[in-house]
């Protein structure tokens, strides 16, 4: 071969041997390497030239062949030769348009589809079908002739008209081939390339026809139909704004032609094919499924309705939480119309990040306003009622509807309250009983260790949510009346025990990471969320049982399964191991400590007395830890006539855990004699409580049962008064810390705030009986609610001026209706019980938390907390008091006056014993765990032999000063006179 690039140099050979002694060996090697590279370069250039020459010859030959094919095609456009040429030419839009126009004008599309050319025509036409399909998908505004040919090829009627009965099988063959070779992917791309605003595009009706033709052609019992339906669902029903992209006439045709009655064919493969859909497309699948299926709820076969719900649930289970909200997933989520949409949500908010980090939530693009508008119908009462009606006509669909409802509430928590309130009102409110009796009562959950029964979880979770929601607006009268709309007390016993077993098992697991990160199979729900839902319901049921017991003895306890002594030691140890900040949430505590998780969330699992012992151990450990780093004693002077003000001025910012020495200043400005060994502080504290809790001071109000709560008046929210609430909280925390009993009763709904718990409608009865009765009347009203002319406002009066406060944004313009009356009842109760005293309660609890770790208090409910503060309202046990009494002066246990004293005490009735206890300790209730817990212990000291002198007491040190009476009658009369009149209080 001649040199191609003019390189005719020959290799130079030196035959003269080495002629230069100065040439180094390195230079010789470099020269050889350079020549080798040069030769390699020449070789590559020659090979490239050969390749280019071959390519050019191929291009030239292809052009020549293509031109010959075009000529042959032109000579026989509608014949078999022309069809072969069309396939061989390939993707040429002009040729395809020409062929389509020609066969349509001559009506010769099926002219070769019979006789000996039938099989050849069928093979070629399948290829032509996809040449046409690719052509129109690349050119959304292509010539309509190509689309007309495609629609004709998939139309059995056209083939039958041209070929007779055999034409149907021919169409089926082409249709199956088209479906297997990405028909729906091409159609989806074509439709999405046309904007939603361009509904008048002439190609759209043809694309729509191509969508439904295969679904109407294939045999519905065939595998081909199943595969076709799956691809239609995956590619077409996931097109954003699909109904908005199609002209009305075509949309009507598509809706009518979709074989939704055959949805059940998808039931065996939902999980598999739904998992192949990209995450953002699930939102559009849900919106489009609803748009096409909802008008047919009433006429869908049961199997198809079940499949529809299963398909919707499968998509919901894949979506991240809040995916259906108006904002994008990256934005903060806020309730649109939640019951707690008043800026005062009771939901628990983590204060520190201490649990294991989870994978970040997937990001979804923002939803189009039109898609969002369609999705808003899903939780609407109209839609839910239509689904409930259809599911109850075909009762077999109710379990699938329950699963869908659980999925919707999980993914769209800001609409959960709206959904639950609609369900509670449906059909007279009997859905709770129906779900329990038909699906939950026989469930294995809570009866054994099987926690993976998927079918049992959705009914149990929905019932739990529904029952918890119903309790928000259920008065005690309705609760205990065995109403047909709620569970009977016997059913509630069984139901609550099942919930209790599940919750305890989830808290008691040592490996809390699996609880925090693992989830219920088939549901987009972590185990920790399941536990939270069940716990919330249990707490609400237990609150009713605490006020008016109806559960069997030991129903709530696990003491028979756990050794309480080891439980106490382990709980104390776990408390010592917590190095995180003090303000841990209940969920965070559960993560670190199973036992503290039980004590903070379902404390009623452990007997009250055991929890009190644990509380005292926590306090003692805290004292011991502080004693390792002791701080100086705080010396405080208090004027007798200004105890509250001086206490506030001296102690508002002091470390109340440090020892405090009180010195009283008398009316002459002189310090009173005596050393504070603890008793003087108790006297100061008792006097301080009497002042700060006085309702005449304006900070507190009392209900009809003389239980106090913060004054809701705006006056009480002024910064100075909030500081007083904060100070009072710290003082009360000091009492709990030191074990000093306080003779004050707090309203239950206010105590609930200490424990971060919600207040219910029934709590309103103790605060505002008239409002409570009015709300009960509204709840049970059978007439037209709108006739009552109520709106979402609440009336308040301050300084003689009445005004209306909106419960929701623009509440004065939102009427109360049958559908939203439960929300109105809840929000009204919540405003009166919580929001009006929100700032006061937060300030009080802030002060209380300075002294007492919040998780210690969460071990108790409201009634138990009141007992912890003021002692148990139980009979005074004289024998227990005598066993823990100390004597001073001339007295001992065998002294005659002491013997007479105890005989008189035995003769006293309980009311007289309480008067005596108040006389010597300032509190009429005995300590919870007996008089051994009285600090300091009860003591009796002789007070001389004067028979006319009354007994006196020093309540600061729980001391009775008893003269040496020689007569039992005199002792009885003098003691009764002293305790009945309050006389004899001695400050010495």
Image (tube, rainbow, N blue to C red):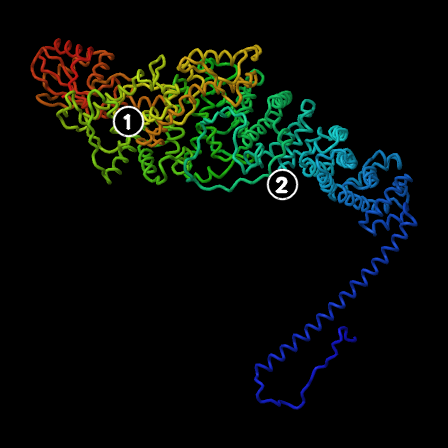
Q: Secondary structure at mark 2?
A: loop
Res 632 → quadrant? top left
Q: Residue at x 7, y 13 (%)?
A: 946
Q: What residue does disc 2 label? A: 278
Left or right, 290 with respect to 956, comes to right
Q: What residue does disc 1 label? A: 731
The quarter of the image holding the C terminus is top left
Q: Position of residue 952 (x, y in %)?
A: 15, 16
Is residue 883 visible in the rendered image? The answer is: no
**Between marks 1 and 2, how big is the CA–CA gap?**
59 Å
Q: What number is the disc on residue 635?
A: none
Mark 2 and mark 1 in contact (Cβ < 8 Å)? no
Q: Disc 1 vs disc 2: which is toward the camera?
A: 1
The quarter of the image holding the N terminus is bottom right
Residue 335, placed above or below residue 980: below
Q: Position of residue 720 (x, y in %)?
A: 33, 25
Return the disc, 1 or 2, that comes first in the chain's sequence.
2
Q: Position of residue 334 (x, y in %)?
A: 52, 30
Residue 498, placed above or below residue 183: above
Q: Position of residue 801 (x, y in %)?
A: 43, 14
Return the residue nearer the eye: 289 or 395.
289
Left or right, 821 with respect to 853, comes to right
Q: Secondary structure at mark 1?
A: helix
Res 290 → quadrant? top right
């Amino acid at each position: 071969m001649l040199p191609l690039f003019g390189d005719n140099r020959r290799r130079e050979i030196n035959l003269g041997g080495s002629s230069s002694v100065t040439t180094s060996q390195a230079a010789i090697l470099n020269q050889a390497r350079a020549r080798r590279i040069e030769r390699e370069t020449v070789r590559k250039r020659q090979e490239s030239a050969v390749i280019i020459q071959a390519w050019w010859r191929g291009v030239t030959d292809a052009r020549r062949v293509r031109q010959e094919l075009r000529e042959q095609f032109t000579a026989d456009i509608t014949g078999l030769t022309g069809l072969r040429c069309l396939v061989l030419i390939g993707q040429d839009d002009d040729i395809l348009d020409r062929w389509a126009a020609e066969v349509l004008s001559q009506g010769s599309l099926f002219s070769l589809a019979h006789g000996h050319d039938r099989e050849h025509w069928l093979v070629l036409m399948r290829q032509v079908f996809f040449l046409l399909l690719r052509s129109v998908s690349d050119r959304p505004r292509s010539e309509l002739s190509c689309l007309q040919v495609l629609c004709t090829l998939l139309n059995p009627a056209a083939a039958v008209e041209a070929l007779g009965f055999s034409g149907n099988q021919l169409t089926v063959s082409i249709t199956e081939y088209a479906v297997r070779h990405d028909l729906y992917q091409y159609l989806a791309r074509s439709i999405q390339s046309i904007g939603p605003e361009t509904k008048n595009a002439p190609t759209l009706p043809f694309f729509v026809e191509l969508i439904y033709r295969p679904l109407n052609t294939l045999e519905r019992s065939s595998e081909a139909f199943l595969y076709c339906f799956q691809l239609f669902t995956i590619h077409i029903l996931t097109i954003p704004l699909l109904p908005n992209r199609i002209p009305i006439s075509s949309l009507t045709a598509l809706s009518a032609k979709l074989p939704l009655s055959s949805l059940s064919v998808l039931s065996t493969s939902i999980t598999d094919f739904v998992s192949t859909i990209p995450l953002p497309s699930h939102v559009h699948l849900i919106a489009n499924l609803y748009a096409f299926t909802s008008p047919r709820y009433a006429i869908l076969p049961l199997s198809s309705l079940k499949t529809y719900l299963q398909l919707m649930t499968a998509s919901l289970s894949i979506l991240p939480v809040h995916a259906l909200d108006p904002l994008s997933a990256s934005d903060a989520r806020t309730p649109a119309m939640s019951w707690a949409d008043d800026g005062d949500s009771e939901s628990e908010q983590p204060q520190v990040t201490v649990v294991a980090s989870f994978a970040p939530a997937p990001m979804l693009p923002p939803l189009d306003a039109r898609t969002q508008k369609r999705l808003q119908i899903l939780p609407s009462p109209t839609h839910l009622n239509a689904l409930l009606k259809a599911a109850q006509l075909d009762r077999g669909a109710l379990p699938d509807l329950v699963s869908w409802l659980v999925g919707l509430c999980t993914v769209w928590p800001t609409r959960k309250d709206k959904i639950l309130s609609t369900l509670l009102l449906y059909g007279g409110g009997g859905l709770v009983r129906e779900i329990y009796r038909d699906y939950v009562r026989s469930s294995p959950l809570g009866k054994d260790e099987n926690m993976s029964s998927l079918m049992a979880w959705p009914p149990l979770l929905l019932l739990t949510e529904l029952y918890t929601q119903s309790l928000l607006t259920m008065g005690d009268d309705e609760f205990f009346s065995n109403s047909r709309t709620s569970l009977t007390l016997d059913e509630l016993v069984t139901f609550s025990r099942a919930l209790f077993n599940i919750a305890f098992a989830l808290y008691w697991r040592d490996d809390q990471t699996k609880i925090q990160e693992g989830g219920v199979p088939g549901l987009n729900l972590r185990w920790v969320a399941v536990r939270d839902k069940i716990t919330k319901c249990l707490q609400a049921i237990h609150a009713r049982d605490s006020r008016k017991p109806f559960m069997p003895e030991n129903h709530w306890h696990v003491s028979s399964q756990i050794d309480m002594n080891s439980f106490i030691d382990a709980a104390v140890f776990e408390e010592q191991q917590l190095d995180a900040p003090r303000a841990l949430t209940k969920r965070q505590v559960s993560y670190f400590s199973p036992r503290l998780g039980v004590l903070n969330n379902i404390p009623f699992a452990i007997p009250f007395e055991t929890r009190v012992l644990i509380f005292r151990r926590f306090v003692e450990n805290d004292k011991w830890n502080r004693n390792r780093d002791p701080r100086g004693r705080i010396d405080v002077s208090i004027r007798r006539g200004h105890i509250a003000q001086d206490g506030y001025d001296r102690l508002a910012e002091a470390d109340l855990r440090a020892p405090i020495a009180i010195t009283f200043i008398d009316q002459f400005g002189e310090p009173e004699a005596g050393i504070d060994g603890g008793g003087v502080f108790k006297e100061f504290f008792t006097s301080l409580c009497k002042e700060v809790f006085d309702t005449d001071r304006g900070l507190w109000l009392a209900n009809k049962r003389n239980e106090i709560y913060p004054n809701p008046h705006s006056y009480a929210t002024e910064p100075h008064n909030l500081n007083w609430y904060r100070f009072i909280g710290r003082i009360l925390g000091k009492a709990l810390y030191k074990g000093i009993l306080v003779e004050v009763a707090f309203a239950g709904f206010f105590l609930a705030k200490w424990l971060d718990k919600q207040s219910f409608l029934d709590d309103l009865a103790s605060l505002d009986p008239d409002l409570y009765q009015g709300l009960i009347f509204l709840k049970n009203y059978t007439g037209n609610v709108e006739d009552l002319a109520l709106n979402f406002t609440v009336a308040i009066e301050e300084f003689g001026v009445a005004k209306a406060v909106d419960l929701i944004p623009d509440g004065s313009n939102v009427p109360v209706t049958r559908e939203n009356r439960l929300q109105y009842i809840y929000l009204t109760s919540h405003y009166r019980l919580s929001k009006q005293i929100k700032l006061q309660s937060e300030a009080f609890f802030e002060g209380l938390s300075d002294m007492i770790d919040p998780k210690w208090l969460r071990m108790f409910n409201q009634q138990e907390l009141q007992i912890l503060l003021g002692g148990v309202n139980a009979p005074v046990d004289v024998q227990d008091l005598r066993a823990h009494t100390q004597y001073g002066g001339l007295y001992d246990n065998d002294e005659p006056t002491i013997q007479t004293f105890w005989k008189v005490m035995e003769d006293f009735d309980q009311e007289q014993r309480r008067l005596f206890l108040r006389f010597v300790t300032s509190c009429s209730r005995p300590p919870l765990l007996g008089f051994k817990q009285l600090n300091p212990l009860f003591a009796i000291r002789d007070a001389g032999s004067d028979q006319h002198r009354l007994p006196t007491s020093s309540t600061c040190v729980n001391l009775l000063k008893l003269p040496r009476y020689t007569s039992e009658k005199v002792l009885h009369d003098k003691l009764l006179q002293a305790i009945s009149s309050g006389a004899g209080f001695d400050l010495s």
